[in-house]
Amino acid sequence: MTSLLMLEAMNKLKKKDREIYNHSLRVAEIAEMIASHLHLDGKQTYQLVNGCWLHDIGKLLIPIQFMKKTGSFSPIEREILKRYPTLGAESLRALNKIDGHIIDIVELHHERWDGQGFPYGLRGQDIPVFARICAIVDSFDNMVKILPYHKKLSSRVAKEQLLMDAGTLFDPYYVHIFISLFDLIDQQLINQLHPNIC
């Protein structure tokens, strides 16, 4: 059962920015498909899905003008934006009732396989598995939806981008798991982003 505390936090995010909330739902739904494919048990599925649902919760603590800005960010603005995973994790830790694996996803989903991510520059196997999975799903969904700071890509182009980034940004093993489920995931995104097509 989803914690009431998590529901309350996500309702606040929904009120602040509906698109980020909808993105979080899509990421969680795709994570659930991956959990099923990996035959995760109930507890692991709960951790992965809810961590992906909450992954952007730190954006509650970032001024809305940063999230709505079009064009490039200044170095100072980029540094402010890069704080949101840590802010989100700290806010969840303060509740004292959220599973640590969920908090890891929130805090570490912007770490990169090659160690060039943030907030800590973790590399490879040092990044928790569920955070690695969230990074892939989060990136894919961001590529295929319209955002103020980049053009929307087709799902096929986004798929090719993930493959190019495997081994640098992302764990190559989980990229290939994602790709193996691509048709199912792509249909799910079509249903979410373009409900009138189906």
Image (spheres, helix red, strand yellow):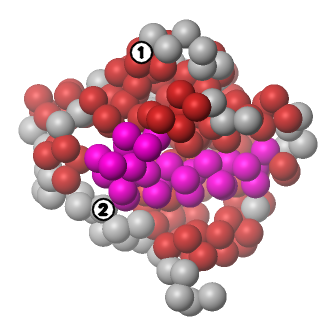
Residue shown at 51% from the left, 64% from the top: 158
Residue 29 included in the magenta stretch of the image? yes
The first of marks 2 and 1 along the sequence is 1
Residue shown at 56% from the left, 57% from the top: 26
The secondary element bearing badge 2 is classed as: loop
- In the image, what residue type sits under mark 1? Glu
Which mark, residue 90?
Answer: 1
- In the image, what residue type sits under mark 2? Leu
The answer to whether one can see residue 181 in this image is yes
Report which quarter residue 42 is drawn in.
top right
- Main SS of the magenta segment? helix
Question: Where are the magenta residues, as a range?
Answer: 10-35
Residue neighbourhood size for the residue with mark 1, other residues' Cα within 10 Å, grouped as few (<14), some (14–19), many (≥20): some
- Is residue 153 rendered to the left or right of residue 66? right
Determine which residue is flagged by label 2. 147
Residue 160 included in the magenta stretch of the image? no
Residue shown at 15% from the left, 52% from the top: 69
Residue shown at 77% from the left, 60% from the top: 180
Q: Nearer the viewer, mark 2 or mark 1?
A: 1
Question: Which quarter of the rendering shows the N terminus?
Answer: top right
- Residue 93 is situated, as x and y percent measured from the top left of the image, at 49, 13
- Is residue 196 rendered to the left or right of residue 41? left
- Residue 36 is situated, as x and y percent measured from the top left of the image, at 84, 49
Residue neighbourhood size for the residue with mark 2, other residues' Cα within 10 Å, grouped as few (<14), some (14–19), many (≥20): some
- Placement of 95 over or under 64, stated as above or below: above
- Residue 73 is situated, as x and y percent measured from the top left of the image, at 14, 43
Q: Which residue is at the front of the view, 24 or 109?
A: 24
